[in-house]
Image: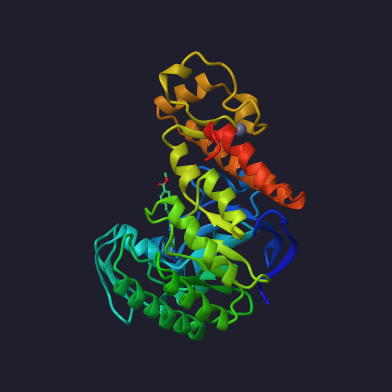
Amino acid sequence: MPVRYELIKECKQSGARLGRLHTPHGTIDTPIFMPVGTQATVKAMSPEELKEMGSQIILSNTYHLFLRPGHEIVKEAGGLHTFMNWDRAILTDSGGFQVFSLSQLRNITEEGVSFRSHLSGEKLFISPEKAMEIQNALGADIIMAFDECPPYPAERDYVKASAERTYRWLKRCISAHQRPGDQALFGIVQGGMYRDLREESARQLVDLDLPGYAVGGLSVGEPKEIMYEVLSYTTPLLPKDKPRYLMGVGSPDALIQGAILGIDMFDCVLPTRIARNGTTMTSQGRVVVRNAKYARDFSPLDPNCDCYTCRNYSRAYLRHLIKADEIFGLRLTSYHNLYFLLRLMEKVRQAIMEDRLLTFRDEFMSQYYGSTH
Ligand SMILES: COC(=O)c1ccc(CCNc2nc3cc4nc(N)[nH]c(=O)c4cc3[nH]2)cc1
Ligand SMILES: [Zn+2]
């Protein structure tokens, strides 16, 4: 059993849970935020810095590593953990979503997806079997089924046919998985924004008794209220004794609301991507530190944060570095944003322990967004 979820406590105020995810590369306290390291590095962060801020699991991408440097090279290096010098847990996404969000000239058939590399333009093809071959070579502790994430909005007929094909692809992934003893394969619930299709997809996946379940097809441009509505009727269909992973989420409010709705795992490029243009998340809300108003602001980025960035540098200095396009600038803002979200999830876990997650949400929302909404 490569990955085992231990349910510690259910929140009395909401659908939130406190859990522990035991993996061959360490134990993860849930609910958890996973920093995204798409190309075998969390951009601008070293493994030591990620450990220092308390990260227990990071995400990498099959699509990107297949294109460059190629999964054979990573395998020859001894796998992703050795290649990137990360001895804690890793989850790899299966490439379905990335093919659609990154490459041109795509054609999707029962067999798989053909596309042109966004790097070289060469014609490539990924099938469920290929996605498993790549992920087995990379060696992540948790791997994702090869699926289609339908666009938003999408016609019901399209979403229905897509979800049915994704289910057939999942069975092919299970058959093609070469390392079920040390890599846990998670299924991905699809079905768009259609309740009956979501319920059917969840039922089919639960019948396969998988080690974990992701909710896919969300955070694709739909209003947050719709995402929350889909979660409110989907997560209760998933087994309590298995981890639930909401893909591609997210912002502080969505992390808290997702936990309230019973999600245990989250990932998003948001904190590191916005850091690179000088946008930071602080206890008082977003601070766009490249803004002229911080030119002479010698106070810390976040007075309530004890991270390396906030203990040693001023907003004026950060603004200067970002404006000067200095690499150290995006390192400092990335470090803080990741630290902020990892601490936020710690506070969420503490609130679940004390049965006061809804109260915590209201307090956080009024501080961060200036109102409870
Ligand atoms: C500044 O912020 C940003 O740049 C930024 C970019 C993208 C997202 C959204 C990411 N959303 C998302 N990632 C996803 C990854 C997925 N993977 C699979 N296999 N299947 C899915 O069904 C799926 C859905 C997703 N939805 C959020 C934020
Ligand atoms: Zn900080």
Residue 7 shows in the view: yes
State which quadrant residue 312 falls in: top right
Image quarter for ligand 2: top right
Q: Quadrant of the N terminus?
A: bottom right
In this rendering, would 150 be left or right of 344? left
Give the percent coordinates (x, y) of residue 5: 69, 68
Residue farthest to the bottom, as pictured: 175
At x 65%, y 31%, the residue is 305
At x 64%, y 50%, the residue is 55
Give the percent coordinates (x, y) of residue 270: 47, 45
At x 71%, y 56%, the residue is 11
- Depth check: give the residue in front, 281 or 323: 281
- Depth check: give the residue in front, 176 or 356: 356
Give the percent coordinates (x, y) of residue 123: 25, 69
Give the percent coordinates (x, y) of residue 73: 46, 66
- Depth check: give the residue in front, 27 or 261: 261
In this rendering, would 347 be left or right of 313? right
Residue farthest to the top, as pictured: 296
Report the number of numbered marks: 0
Q: How is the image coloured?
A: rainbow
State which quadrant residue 167 falls in: bottom left
In this rendering, would 35 be left or right of 72? right
Q: Is residue 249 above or below residue 49?
A: below
Residue farthest to the left, as pictured: 105
Residue 52 shows in the view: no
Q: Is residue 76 above or below residue 208?
A: above
Q: Is residue 246 above or below residue 356?
A: below
